[in-house]
Amino acid sequence: MIPPLDWLQHPALLWLIAAVALAIAELVVPGVFLVFLAAAAAIIGALTLLFPDLPAAGQLVGFALWSVATVTIGRRWYRDFPVQSADPLLNDRVARLVGEVVTVVEPVSDHAGRVRVGDGEWPARGPEAAAGTRVRITGATGATLRVEPLPALSRD
């Protein structure tokens, strides 16, 4: 006969298993968020070991409060000690385009225009530029690129 597994139903163990599962999920899908929920679950698991009569409602409220606390602490930590990236513009497509030289497809003005970027076209604004003119991307407002004409080549 298989012995009863009553210890598997202990709330503290369930919270600690949840903490491990959340930590593993953070490793599988990194987002720097689930780790804080894992910490909250571990804290509730420890508190449930210390106070075994803590009702389920108290555990859930405690988990919610500790989740808010750990996420707040984590956000403040990452704000004060940002993680350095080898490529800070990795997820900022528009910022990566700044400095690129592109071709005007539809005449550019302060109100309208389009430029060819790679194999696509982007809306652009800037000083007057005729179709076929080469311009440099200087920035963006939303998804609209700001462009400027290339400086004239001097023939000294």
Image (spheres, rainbow, N blue to C red):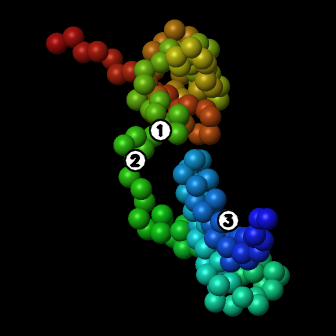
Q: Which residue is drawn at 29% across and 15% down?
A: 153
- Residue drawn at x 53%, y 34% is 93
How would you rate the neighbour count of disc 1 (Cα within 10 Å): few for under 14, some for 14-19, many for 20 or more? few
Kindly identify the amino acid type of the residue bearing the numbered disc 3: Ala
Q: Is mark 1 on a helix, strand or loop?
A: loop
* Mark 2 or mark 1, earlier in chain: 2
Residue 145 position within the rendered picture, expressed as x and y whole percent measured from the top left? 56, 31
Residue at image point 63% right, 25% down: 123
Residue 20 sits above or below residue 97 on the image: below
Query: Residue 3 placed where, x, y %?
Result: 75, 70
Label 3, label 2: how far apart the Cα atoms are:
31 Å
In the depicted structure, whether residue 156 falls above or below residue 8: above
Instruction: Report, in whole angstroms, how far the alpha carbon at label 1 lies from the one at label 3.
Output: 33 Å
Q: Which of 24 and 105 is in front in this view?
A: 24
Secondary structure, mark 2, is loop
Apparent side of residue 59 relative to residue 86 in the rendered image (left or right)? right
The residue identified by callout 3 is: 18
Q: Which mark is residue 90?
A: 1
Quadrant of the drawing holding the N terminus: bottom right
Which label number is shown at residue 85?
Answer: 2
Find residue 64 and report its horizontal and vertical position in percent. Answer: 73, 75
Q: Nearer the viewer, residue 62 or 7?
A: 7
Tag 3's secondary structure? helix
Q: Distance between the residues labelled 2 and 1?
A: 9 Å
Where in the figure is residue 34, as x and y percent of width and height?
62, 60
